[in-house]
Amino acid sequence: MRDIPYSYDERCRLEFQALISRVDHLFVDIDIDCPYGLPYVSTFHQATFAPLSDRAMELFLGAGYRRNGNCLYNMRCKNCIACTPIRLSPSAFKPNRNQKRTVKKNGDVQNDLLPLKPDIENLELCEKFLSSRYPKENNSSHGYFRDFFLNNIVSSAQIQYRVEETLVGTSVIDIGYNWLNAVYFYFDPVESKRSLGTYNIMHLVDICLEWELDYLYLGYLIDTVPAMSYKRNFKPHFVLRDQKWQCVT
């Protein structure tokens, strides 16, 4: 009797079960106020890691985990299930009319892929973004770079977006042989009419196609949070529900 071949996601699920059984004792639950402004206590199920193999990081991403510095986590909130992992298959993605217009509108934007580092220009732009978007929170660009962006467990980089030499946006990404992980994107609030969040995802799709990467992880889709809900406009996309990636067209 011939063996039935497993799908990519099923192979990942089985491998992840073996992996998590070896490291699950490292994870702890951390309760904080919801970072997305929802009226619930957020529970981060997280662990700190040393450098990970490319495949191990791929398995964690495929299981819905996210990276925060050297920590990997998923959400175990008791009263909320709003955070839904979302990813794209770049080869299947079909941009809509608005996304095409956004790319055309930003035809003057130059982009550069660079090492990830907290230089003065990035720190100032990130601080401007945080002050505008999250003014009531005790956030700082130095803290974001130190605790969130920089890490020793995966290969990370930044994409800088410029208009006439002025930095207008920066995308922090993790890179694997078969995947790209969108960690964070910050931009100049003065340039909000450009829809740089959408433009950034369109550019990440192009990078994945150029590098022949099969999966683009976009973090969490949260329908009630505008800064997170726009991701649902990229179709087809896949959301992780009940430990299975489901296609949304």
Image (spheres, grey):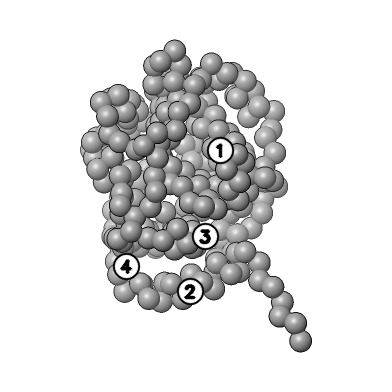
For label 3, count other residues whose C-alpha is less than 10 Å away and answer few (under 14), some (14-19) or many (20+). Answer: many
What separation in Å lies between label 3 and label 4 (alpha carbons)? 18 Å
Judging by the rendered image, the residue that carries numbered circle 3 is 62
Tell me residue 214's x, y (percent): 60, 51
The kind of residue tagged 1 is: Ile
The kind of residue tagged 3 is: Gly
Q: Which residue is drawn at 32% across and 67% down?
A: 27
In the image: residue 224, left or right of residue 75: right
Judging by the rendered image, the residue that carries numbered circle 1 is 207
Work out whether mark 1 precedes mark 3 in sequence or the reverse, and give the earlier one: 3
Q: Nearer the viewer, residue 89 or 128?
A: 89
Q: Please give the label number shown on residue 17.
A: 2
Above-or-below relation of 48 to 233: below
The kind of residue tagged 2 is: Gln
Q: Residue furthest right?
A: 1
What separation in Å lies between label 2 and label 3 (alpha carbons)? 12 Å
* Residues at circles 2 and 4 in contact by the CB criterion of under 8 Å: no
What separation in Å lies between label 1 and label 3 (alpha carbons)? 20 Å
Could you tell me which secondary element the residue under label 3 belongs to? Answer: helix
Could you tell me which secondary element the residue under label 2 belongs to? Answer: helix
Work out whether mark 3 precedes mark 4 in sequence or the reverse, and give the earlier one: 4
What separation in Å lies between label 2 and label 4 (alpha carbons)? 15 Å
Work out whether mark 1 precedes mark 4 in sequence or the reverse, and give the earlier one: 4
Work out whether mark 2 precedes mark 4 in sequence or the reverse, and give the earlier one: 2
Q: Please give the label number shown on residue 27.
A: 4
Above-or-below relation of 138 to 187: below
